[in-house]
Image (cartoon, helix red, strand yellow):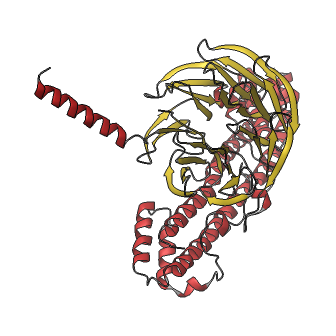
Amino acid sequence: MIRSSVSRRIGWAAGVAVLASVGFVSVPSFAQETVPEATTQNAIPEVKKDEWPCVYRKVPVLSAATIWDGPEIKDTTSWHSDEAIRKLSQYAISRRVKMEDVEAAIKKFAAGLPADKRDAKLTELFSAVLSRTNEDRKTVMHGIEKMHKQQVVRSEEIKKEALALQPEEQAEAENPEGEAGVAGKGSDAQEKYKWEIRAFQEKQANIPLACEIPQLIDERAGDIARAIRAEMKS
Amino acid sequence: MSRPSAILTALLSAAAFASTASTADAYTAYVTNEKDNTVSVIDTDKMEVIKTAKVGQRPRGIVMSKDGKWLIICTSDDNDVKIYDAKTLEYVKSLPSGPDPELLTLHPDGRRLYIANEDDNLVTVVDINTSKVITEIPVGVEPEGMGMSPDGKVLVNTSETTNMAHFIDTEKHETFDNVLVDSRPRVAMFNSAQTQLWVSSEVGGTVTVINPADRKIIHKISFEIPGITKEAIQPVGIRISKDDKIAFVALGPANRVAVIDTSTFKVLKYILVGQRVWHMYFTPDYKYLLTTNGASNDVSVIDVASQKAIKSIKVGRYPWGVVVSPH
């Protein structure tokens, strides 16, 4: 009974510590004392309450100037009517394609252009890449924000469950030999709670990984821009 | 020695000389990769990574010992400074520092190492030979930039939160003056004539040029890049050409290096490099300037004469500091 009570108490306190670590609740002093060091260290990385959970600042749109020093892009839609540019830009931004293959494809495309239109067409290609990159970023960033929002909702639910379990566990802690709570009901609720905490932690651990994707997209766009510029005279 | 063997020896010596001469500009650059806990080694002649070695946790600031034998690296999450053999990249020893060391500079005497400890508002002075702390100098909040005057008499430390450049006497190890600069000063750099001290302010978006003799501000440089927001222009790294005529300033997420005339303080050009450019280092012949680009995980090579980025070299994740061996 004592063992069961202690393990239940640690489970509740650890849950509160998990939420506290992500800034959703403050840990009561008595709970801090009972949370083992290892448990708090295993708690998930910091997550903010606002809509953007990543460490770095959200940049909603990648502007041409950040990765491009070529001619000014005056028409951002003309590329839609050029099938070769449509296809090449799609191929280039696919992160499954190796960058050296993209460089070779851009080189081949440039070689096939008439000299007087070469730079204009390559600028158009960059415009297409930028446009597709921004669509890609938008989808990914929306996904990250959605994931974060779901975690905030989930944390609220866990918080309520933790508070519901608290009186029972405190009563047990104060009187370990007593029969506080209904044994069957208590253990089911605690078991469910434990799994929810685990699922919460696993999803939370994925957020920093997801946060890296916009950076990878930007890195790729920069590499493509450089490959296009290498084929231009202006 | 017989005549034929003397001729052979002469020919071999000539061949050896020719071989050395052809690779005279092949230097070795070392880049700390903050996220991978590694150092990328770059052959500046081939312009490619020739080796990647594991080092301590979160490597950031990096310098070389005067003789080029040691790499001295701030391993910030280990709360110390680690020394590695520059040839083999094998661990040699650790030096004590305060918590979260970020940037460091070596005194021209080759012995005293000055380390900025971001978390405890101190500059720690360590003897790299004995590994003993000589002293600790209190400075402003979140010390970072470390600029040593070429004669070794003055160290300038910048504090990110106090927004000051602290002038420290390296004999007495005492601060003798403070100059207020714009928000979040990151790097301090003297020109070789010691007539100018350049301090970059990351959040302020400016570079303050100070006269080291009287600590008066000579000029404040601002930047404007078409298509780039003011907030994205975040000056960090500074390097000044050998003849003191041109300064290069890395502008962070603006992905540009500004080229500035040091007599008029006019921006002559913005060079597009990789993403979130922070720190830079010249090759010893001043032919190339290498930049670390933290967000695009590469190093840009700028040809100093043409002021163009001529190559991007992929390194580890979040490249931070860079140093080039003097040999």
In percent of width and height, residue A210 lies at 62, 54
Residue A171 visible in the displayed image: no
Residue A200: x and y in percent read 69, 46
Viewer-proximal residue, A200 or B52? B52
Rendering quarter of residue A113: bottom left
Residue A67 left/right relative to A177: left
Residue located at (44% from left, 65% from top): A103
- How many numbered marks have been drawn onto this rendered protein structure? 0
Q: Is residue B136 left or right of residue B50?
A: right
Residue B325, image x, y percentages: 51, 34
Quadrant position of residue A222: bottom right
The residue sitting at 67% across, 18% down in the picture is B126
Residue most toward the front?
A: B3
Question: Relative to B273, is A117 above or below?
Answer: below
Name the residue at 56% across, 47% down: B290
Q: Position of residue A59 (x, y in %)?
A: 72, 61
Quarter of the image containing the N terminus of chain B?
top left
Q: Quadrant of residue B192?
A: top right
**In this rendering, is residue A66 above or below B172?**
below
Front residue of this view, candidates B210 and B88: B210
Which residue sits furthest bottom?
A81
Residue occupying the point 47% across, 75% down: A88
Residue placed most toward the observer, A45 or B158: B158
Residue A160 in view: yes
B189 shown above or below A120: above
